[in-house]
Amino acid sequence: MNHHNVKARQPVRGILFDKDGTLLDFTPTWLPAYQAGALFAAGGDEAKARHMMVSTGLDEQTDDFAHGSLLASATTDQIAEAWIALGADHSAAQLTSLLDGIFAEQTAISSAPFPGLYELIFELSEKDIVLGLGTNDGEGSAKEFLKTANIDPFFSFVAGYDSGHGGKPAPGMILAFCDAHDLEPGSVMVVGDNHCDLEMGRAADAGFVVGVLSGNGTHDELAPFADVIISGIEEFSLLDFD
């Protein structure tokens, strides 16, 4: 963990988690989903589908996703627009809707929660901390993940890019979380693996902004926006936020 002496400005009453790369392992969860979505968008043409994925962030050599790429952090509508520009034969609204369905179905199958996730979420809920999930994925897919991981009863707020609060890095998800539970932004911790997660926290003036290195963001990318950087949720117990 970096910045060991950093603690929250005030006691944390709520935590808004990112999903992909923070609570679940991004690549094994999303590679099958993007492959299925791209193949559909390409009309079944495997070479075209591969080209669409590589052009939006897939590393051809490793089958991993480039830091900061569309596939690493963008919303479904942004991916749909990019794939249309690369030859997908659908309207933006139609392809976005279809991809949301494909992504939700596929990630429900391939979802790979990080070890210790249930135990962490249960422990936080026992401390009477309000838990929320904010993702640039769709709200339906996010709720399905929580059910699959058996942690949905602990989350009282779920927001996706399509929930009406805007996408990251805009502050809308955090502000909606605060409004829903009568929280001040200064009492909220934001946890994410991507710079857009942490920029969202800064934009909302969140009290404690935590970066994790378990996803697509590098230390250098996260450091300008983070109060503290940890390797992943396995180091959560080291944080001082009482």
Image: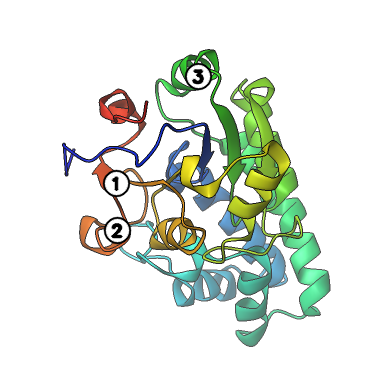
Determine whether label 3 and label 2 are within 8 Å by CB.
no
Helix, strand or loop at disc 2?
Answer: helix
Where does label 3 land, which residue? 118
Determine whether label 1 and label 2 are within 8 Å by CB.
yes
**What amino acid is found at the position of numbered circle 1 in the picture?**
Leu
- Residue count near mark 3 (Cα–Cα under 10 Å), binned few <14, some 14–19, many ≥20: some
Identified at 42% across, 65% down, the residue is: 58
Helix, strand or loop at disc 3?
Answer: helix
- Residue count near mark 1 (Cα–Cα under 10 Å), binned few <14, some 14–19, many ≥20: many
The image shows residue 197, relative to residue 54, as above or below, that is above
Can the viewer see residue 188 in this picture? no
Identified at 72% across, 52% down, the residue is: 102
Determine whether label 1 and label 3 are within 8 Å by CB.
no
Task: Say which quadrant the N terminus sits in.
Answer: top left
Task: Say which quadrant the C terminus sits in.
Answer: top left
Q: Position of residue 44 (x, y in %)?
A: 69, 67
The image shows residue 210, relative to residue 70, as above or below, that is above
Q: Nearer the viewer, mark 3 or mark 2?
A: 2
- From mark 1 to mark 3, how far is it between C-alphas? 19 Å
Where does label 2 land, which residue? 222
Identified at 52% across, 31% down, the residue is: 13
**What amino acid is found at the position of numbered circle 2 in the picture?**
Leu
